[in-house]
Image: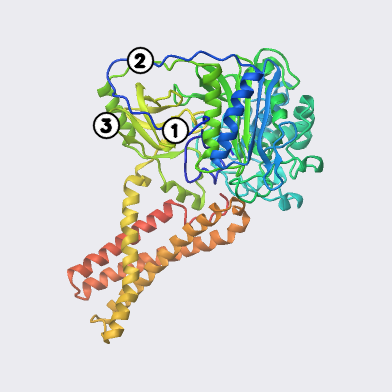
């Protein structure tokens, strides 16, 4: 669960994190790349703005959403638009239940907003700040009945609200089933105490999105208020706004369960089950589009300087104030909200993704306008990202158009900066450093230097589906042709140490990888090493069959024969251990409900197998090399024996730094 991004990564669904964004026709072809010069580019003229009325926006939505859903194989969706304290549009599209042909009703159909739920949790935190029970800058351990270990600097609620707690990602038990919830196995306190993620960054220094951190904040609200988290949200957030068809309770109360939209991977697939989120404050909300409109109105009231049923204007002003800016001039975090500059408008927002539901909430605070969109299917080829992107950006272009500011760049300087940026390999700051999850870090990000000052970001795609390409507009700042997204680098002592893009910069960096684990050398070495192991492993039975067919014996001393056979058996063992880890990851990636304590036995068994494989591989390959030299074998055999030892060393090194021998079941 997290905000929406355009970044496609191996962890995207696993971590329920991030993704990205439509128009009422086929996706346009990628525009031709402009020739870069050292003079200012002429910006396109801004179109005239439409007047935002209920009639106009409803017509626009009705022209966009039905085709977008059909194109993406998405079952249904809901959109609500508010302005000046009123709901001016609330539209349901497609089906809440495909088999029953039950249409989406914005007043009655519940959707799962995913991490948009966090905004209600952060609102609850600010209520307790307003009441004097919480201090944003106090050590969170002062409020907890267990300790969150730190590296000196205390973690505060301000850190939690800006995703700068420094805690690593936790993925196990992020999703579970209704049966588990009914059995009482999803209690918030028990979930939080079962394993506290390690601190991998100093608090306040690196943005790293954390569902666990948000859940800590929700638990703290429950602790200081004396109410359960569910009770608190109902009494102090939902009821004051008359959000009568919304709930964090899991499973849903009987009176709401029948109103819940079914969730789908594709509209043409069978529906999935209800997604229970043990880290409830981070993403357990179920709500109608109309209820989310009421929530937006309350925050727009306080943004306009008026008290609302939720917060006093002065308290809310703290919430809307930018807190962090790790990669100027990119987007930043307020307290819980992403701050977004969209067509020159200051927008506060948050995205959310579960396995099946994908949502976004935008508040154009200076205009008194809010937009909420949610769909109940993942769709084909990143369709949910395209829908959200084109809907929200199209909305801004229609009602708040603006010119893209001109770029003034020196091309030779831009080319040099692009080379510096593309020279490194990078890791997402939202990551796990515990146990075998470090294996995911072998998939690193590398940007492409196109040679003209522009850079390519293959894991970031535009709404046309093409790999992202960014053009220089300022020192170490690049921008897409449509002006909607920027990429910027952090430079220290003349070296790029990190970068980010607007879509994720409030809560995530891509950090340059240290040399000892850089994929620049490690992946080629691993590729060659696995090839050597596979050939060695296969050559053993093949050569044995040939010798048996022709009744030939190995013409070597017995010790040399034993060393040869032992090293080949160890090759099979090493390959088996790696295949086991890859198979385990592929198995639970196919169904995220499998990422639970049931994996513990497999993790421990594979860790043990990896230890045995490493020990056997290193010992037997070294023995084989010695006996190959002593046994008088030729140079090809000696060279291969040396290669086999190097392959064993390389795969052992990769296994150790990837946590495959850590015997860690918390991840």
Q: Is residue 262 visible?
A: yes
Picture layout, residue 9 above or below residue 558: above
Identify residue for label 2: 42
**Real-space Cα separation, disc 3 to disc 1, in angstroms:** 21 Å
Residue in the image at 43% along x and 24% along y: 482
Identify residue for label 1: 462
Q: First in sequence, mark 3 or 1: give its number.
A: 3
Q: Is residue 151 visible?
A: no
Q: First in sequence, mark 2 or 3: give its number.
A: 2
Q: Camera-side residue: 463 or 469?
A: 463
| Pointers 1 and 2 in contact (C-beta within 8 Å) | no
Residue in the image at 77% along x and 31% along y: 225
Q: How many marks?
A: 3
- Residue 25 shows which numbered tag? none
Residue 559 location in percent, x, y? 29, 79
Residue 110 location in percent, x, y? 71, 37
Q: Camera-side residue: 286 or 259?
A: 259
Secondary structure at badge 1 equals: loop
Secondary structure at badge 2 equals: loop
283 with respect to 164 (left or right): right
- Structural crowding at the residue carrying mark 2, measured as other residues with C-alpha within 10 Å and reported as few (<14), some (14–19) or many (≥20): few
Q: In front: mark 2 or mark 3?
A: 2
Residue 531 location in percent, x, y? 32, 61
| Pointers 2 and 3 in contact (C-beta within 8 Å) | no
Q: First in sequence, mark 1 or 2: give its number.
A: 2
Identify residue for label 3: 451
- Structural crowding at the residue carrying mark 1, measured as other residues with C-alpha within 10 Å and reported as few (<14), some (14–19) or many (≥20): many
Q: In front: mark 3 or mark 1?
A: 1
């Amino acid at each position: 669960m997290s905000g929406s991004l355009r970044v496609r990564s191996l962890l995207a669904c696993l971590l329920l994190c991030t993704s990205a964004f439509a128009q009422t026709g086929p996706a346009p072809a990628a525009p031709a790349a402009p020739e870069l010069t050292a003079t200012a580019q002429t910006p396109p003229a801004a179109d005239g703005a439409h007047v935002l009325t209920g009639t106009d926006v409803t017509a626009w939505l009705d022209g966009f959403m039905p085709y977008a859903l059909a194109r993406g194989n998405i079952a249904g969706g809901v959109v609500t638009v508010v302005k000046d304290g009123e709901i001016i549009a609330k539209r349901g599209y497609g089906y809440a239940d495909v088999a029953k042909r039950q249409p989406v009703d914005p007043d009655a159909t519940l959707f799962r907003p995913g991490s948009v739920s966090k905004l209600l949790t952060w609102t609850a935190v600010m209520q307790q700040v307003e009441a004097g029970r919480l201090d944003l800058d106090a050590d969170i351990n002062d409020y907890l009945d267990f300790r969150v270990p730190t590296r000196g600097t205390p973690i505060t609620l301000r850190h939690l609200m800006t995703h700068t707690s420094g805690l690593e990602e936790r993925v196990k038990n992020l999703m579970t089933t209704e049966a588990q919830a009914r059995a009482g196995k999803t209690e918030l306190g028990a979930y939080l105490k079962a394993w506290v993620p390690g601190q991998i960054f100093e608090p306040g220094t690196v943005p790293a999105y954390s569902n666990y951190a948000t859940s800590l904040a929700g638990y703290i609200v429950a602790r200081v208020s004396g109410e359960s988290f569910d009770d608190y949200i109902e009494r102090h957030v939902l009821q004051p706004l008359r959000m009568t068809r919304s709930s964090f309770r899991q499973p849903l109360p009987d009176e709401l369960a029948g109103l819940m939209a079914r969730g789908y991977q594709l509209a043409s697939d069978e529906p999935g089950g209800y997604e229970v989120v043990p880290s409830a404050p981070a993403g357990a909300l179920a709500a109608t589009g109309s209820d989310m409109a009421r929530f937006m109105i309350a925050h727009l009231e306080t943004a306009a300087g008026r008290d609302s049923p939720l917060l006093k204007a002065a308290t809310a002003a703290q919430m809307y104030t930018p807190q962090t800016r790790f990669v100027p001039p990119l987007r930043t975090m307020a307290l819980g909200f992403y701050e977004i500059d969209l067509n020159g408008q200051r927008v506060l927002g948050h995205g959310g993704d579960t396995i099946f539901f994908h949502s976004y909430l935008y508040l154009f605070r200076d205009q008194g306008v809010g937009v909420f969109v949610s769909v109940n299917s993942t769709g084909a080829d990143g369709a949910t990202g395209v829908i959200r992107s084109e809907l929200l950006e199209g909305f801004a272009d229609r009602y708040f158009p603006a010119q893209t500011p001109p770029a003034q760049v020196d091309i030779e300087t831009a080319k040099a900066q692009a080379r510096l940026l593309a020279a490194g390999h990078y890791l997402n700051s939202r990551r796990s450093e515990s146990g075998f999850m470090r294996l995911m870090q072998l998939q690193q990000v590398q940007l492409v230097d196109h040679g003209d000052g522009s850079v390519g970001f293959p894991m970031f795609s535009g709404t046309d589906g093409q790999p992202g390409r960014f053009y220089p507009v300022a020192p170490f700042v690049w921008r897409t042709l449509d002006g909607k997204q920027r990429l910027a680098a952090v430079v220290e002592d003349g070296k790029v140490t990190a970068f980010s893009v607007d879509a994720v910069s409030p809560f995530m960096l891509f950090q340059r990888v240290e040399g000892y684990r850089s994929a620049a050398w490690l992946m080629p070495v691993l590729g060659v090493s696995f090839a050597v192991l596979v050939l060695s492993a296969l050559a053993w039975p093949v050569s044995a069959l040939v010798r048996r067919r022709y009744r030939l014996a190995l013409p070597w001393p017995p010790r040399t024969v034993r060393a040869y056979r032992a090293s080949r058996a160890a090759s099979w063992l090493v390959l088996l251990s790696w295949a086991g880890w890859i198979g385990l990851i592929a198995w639970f990636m196919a169904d995220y409900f499998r990422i639970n304590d049931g994996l513990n036995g497999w993790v421990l068994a594979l860790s043990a197998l990896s230890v045995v494989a490493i020990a056997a591989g290193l010992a037997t390959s070294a023995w084989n090399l010695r006996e190959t030299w002593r046994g008088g074998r030729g140079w090809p055999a000696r060279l291969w024996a040396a290669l086999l030892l190097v392959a064993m060393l390389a795969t052992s090194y990769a296994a150790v730094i990837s946590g495959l021998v850590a015997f860690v079941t918390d991840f």
